[in-house]
């Protein structure tokens, strides 16, 4: 298969659809990727793997400091914060994110 055909096949696979359905409630919310709070932007695929797409806080964290989206293999996972943290604390994180980082808007 050529790359275009392989990528199309990945997006139409049951695995991609299952990963996307599990991620949908968390897209646009803050999640924990390993040890860093990030914004879950979506789910993508290429000819080799499936990925969670994250937006890190610009200038923060131990990983990317440029604030640019990055793809992380779905072999790993993320940990939702909304509905897990007390509502007041989660809303404070959202407020910090939306008012200090000037990147994707969290809800």
Image: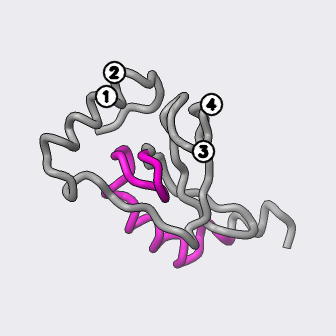
Judged from the image, the secondary structure of the residue bearing numbered disc 3 is loop
Q: Which residue is mark 2?
A: 99
Residue at 75% across, 67% down: 47
Among the two numbered marks 3 and 1 on one chain, the one whose residue lies closer to the N terminus = 3
- Image position of 41 (left or right of 47): left
Q: How far is the residue under mark 4 from the one under mark 3?
A: 9 Å
Q: How far is the residue under mark 2 from the one under mark 4?
A: 17 Å
Instruction: Report if residue 76 lies within the magenta region.
Output: no
The crowding category of the residue bearing disc 2, from other C-alpha atoms within 10 Å (few below 14, some 14 to 19, many at least 20), is few
Q: Residue furthest front?
A: 62
Judged from the image, the secondary structure of the residue bearing numbered disc 4 is loop
Residue 11 position by quadrant: bottom right
Q: Is residue 100 above or below residue 57?
A: above
Among the two numbered marks 2 and 4 on one chain, the one whose residue lies closer to the N terminus = 4
Q: Which residue is mark 1?
A: 96
Q: Residue furthest right?
A: 2
Q: Which residue is mark 4?
A: 66
């Amino acid at each position: 298969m050529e790359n275009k055909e392989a990528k199309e096949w990945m997006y139409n696979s049951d695995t991609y659809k299952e990963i996307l359905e599990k991620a949908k409630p968390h897209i646009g919310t803050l999640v924990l990727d390993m040890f860093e709070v990030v914004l879950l932007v979506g789910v993508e695929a290429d000819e080799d793997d499936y990925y969670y797409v994250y937006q890190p806080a610009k200038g923060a964290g131990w990983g990317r400091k440029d604030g640019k989206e990055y793809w992380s293999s779905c072999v790993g996972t993320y940990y939702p914060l909304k509905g897990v943290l007390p509502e007041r604390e989660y809303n404070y994180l959202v407020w910090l994110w939306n008012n200090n980082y000037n990147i994707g808007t969290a809800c």
